[in-house]
Image (cartoon, helix red, strand yellow):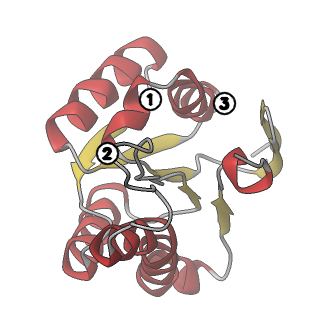
């Protein structure tokens, strides 16, 4: 089979992947990201370039709807799955379901992330009065969820393939002062 290039480009991310046959990509997002143009473009670009795509989202119904729309537009196998990326058990189950449905995972794009804070009100400072529970949720989503998803994709698929690609997308907010 003739090898093709897959190029995905937006703001701070450029990835060029050599592939033969159809790659299976898993895009890990959070619920609000389904509304963002970049995430939709990434899923659509992967599908239009020949990838079958599994869309993993906290809101499983939204993931299923968006996957169905993209599958209809691109003619590729695109499927949505529910998964809270803060839950190790849900990540293990979601990755297992994707491997069961698609047979393997070639590409993982970790694109889930949250930032929880509020304005300075009633004498409360959003930094100095930041609750530890909120901090823990941000770390579980942004760091632990990213690590767990990567670990499970490697454990359940990529190690058997002897290859794979993992792309971790971080927020531009991490390099911009507030």
When the figure is inspected, residue 49 is found, relative to residue 166, above or below; the finding is: above
* Disc marking residue 49: 3
User: Which tag, 2 or 1, sits closer to the chain's start?
Assistant: 1
Name the residue beneath numbered marker 1: 76
Q: Is residue 26 left or right of residue 83?
A: right
Residue occupying image coordinates x 63% and y 28%: 45
Q: Is residue 47 left or right of residue 8?
A: left
Residue occupying image coordinates x 59% and y 78%: 161
Q: Position of residue 88 (x, y in %)?
A: 27, 81
Name the residue beneath numbered marker 2: 122
Residue occupying image coordinates x 65% and y 70%: 164
Disc number lying in front (2 or 1):
2
Q: Position of residue 18 (x, y in %)?
A: 82, 51
Estimate how packed mark 3 is, as few (under 14), some (14 to 19) or many (20 or more) residues with alpha carbons within 10 Å.
some
Q: Are marks 3 and 2 in contact (CB under 8 Å)?
A: no
Estimate how packed mark 2 is, as few (under 14), some (14 to 19) or many (20 or more) residues with alpha carbons within 10 Å.
few
């Amino acid at each position: 089979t003739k090898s093709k290039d897959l190029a995905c480009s937006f703001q701070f991310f450029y990835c060029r992947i050599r592939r033969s046959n159809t790659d299976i990509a898993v895009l890990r997002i959070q619920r609000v990201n389904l509304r963002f143009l970049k995430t939709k473009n990434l899923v659509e670009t992967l599908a239009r370039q020949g990838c079958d795509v599994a869309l993993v989202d906290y809101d499983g119904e939204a993931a299923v709807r968006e996957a169905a729309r993209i599958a209809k537009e691109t003619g590729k196998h695109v499927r949505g799955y529910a998964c809270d990326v803060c839950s190790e058990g849900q990540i293990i189950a979601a990755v297992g379901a994707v491997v069961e449905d698609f047979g393997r995972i070639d590409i993982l794009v970790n694109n889930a992330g949250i930032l929880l804070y509020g304005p300075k009100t009633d004498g409360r400072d959003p930094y100095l009065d930041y609750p530890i529970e909120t901090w823990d949720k941000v770390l579980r989503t942004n760091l632990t969820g990213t690590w767990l998803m990567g670990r499970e994709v490697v454990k359940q698929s990529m190690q058997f393939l002897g290859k794979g690609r993992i792309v971790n997308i971080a927020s531009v907010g991490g390099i911009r002062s507030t």
